[in-house]
Image: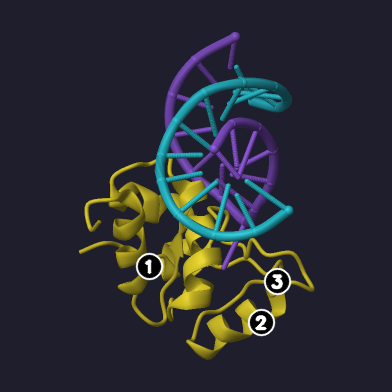
Chain colours: A yellow, B purple, C cyan
Amino acid sequence: MNDSLTERIKNFIKIVPRGKIATYGQIASYAGNPRAARLVSWILHSSSKKYHLPWYRIVNNKGKISLPKGKGYHRQKKLLEQEGILFQEDDVIDLSKFKWEKK
DNA sequence: TTACTGACCTTTT
DNA sequence: AAAAAGGCCAGTA
């Protein structure tokens, strides 16, 4: 079970530190498969409901929130701002500053 | 039960 | 250079 890519992805999502964000591909890559980004999104759907995962710390590769407005976009943005993450004018996060790096 | 889908990314035309 | 296709897995219908 713990060997599955899914479990590893969940694990990585959990260890994203407060005040930082991670991208789908990044998590997938750390988990072992650079191409498993879709799994990450799917896991956020399934797991964040059941477990307490910081789903809001995951954004796409452009540094933007992937959720459409009216579906959680604002909620996610708010949560990130509460953690000290700053948005630029286009609602883009500066990845070079806030992107989390694996130790 | 099979088939399709998803808050995406990488690789190949 | 831009555009299309492939890939990953479990949940949902």
Q: Relative to residue A20, is residue A33 depicted above or below?
A: above
Q: Residue at x 43, y 44 (%)?
A: A36
In whole angstroms, how far apart are the C-alphas of marks 1 and 2? 18 Å
State how far apart marks 1 and 3 are (Cα). Answer: 27 Å
Q: Check chain identity for marks 2 and 3: say if they share one.
A: yes
Numbered disc 1: secondary structure: helix
- Is the residue under label 3 in contact with that under label 2 (CB below 8 Å)? no
**Above or below: residue A7 compared with residue A17:** above
- Left or right: where does residue A46 sit relative to residue A65? left
Report the residue that reaches farthest toward the bottom: A82
Residue nearest the observer in this picture, A24 or A9: A9
Tell me the residue at 36%/64% (across/down): A10
| Distance between the alpha carbons at the discs numbered 2 and 3 | 17 Å
Kindly report which numbered mark, 1 or 3, lies closer to the viewer in this rendering: 1
Q: Which mark is residue A13?
A: 1
Dot placed on the residue nearer the N-terminal end, 1 or 2: 1
Give, as a three-letter code, the residue at label 3.
Glu
Instruction: Name the spot of residue A75 as percent of width and height, x first.
Output: 66, 82
Which residue lies most toward the right here? A70
Left or right relative to A73: residue A9: left
Evaluate if marks 1 and 2 touch, with contact meaning CB atoms under 8 Å apart. no
Chain bearing tag 2 is A
Q: Which residue is mark 3?
A: A89
Q: Amino acid at mark 1?
A: Ile
Mark 3 belongs to chain: A
Rendered image: mark on residue A65:
none
Chain to which the residue tagged by mark 1 belongs: A
Q: Residues within 10 Å of mark 2 (few under 14, many from 20)?
A: some
Which mark, by number, is residue A75?
A: 2
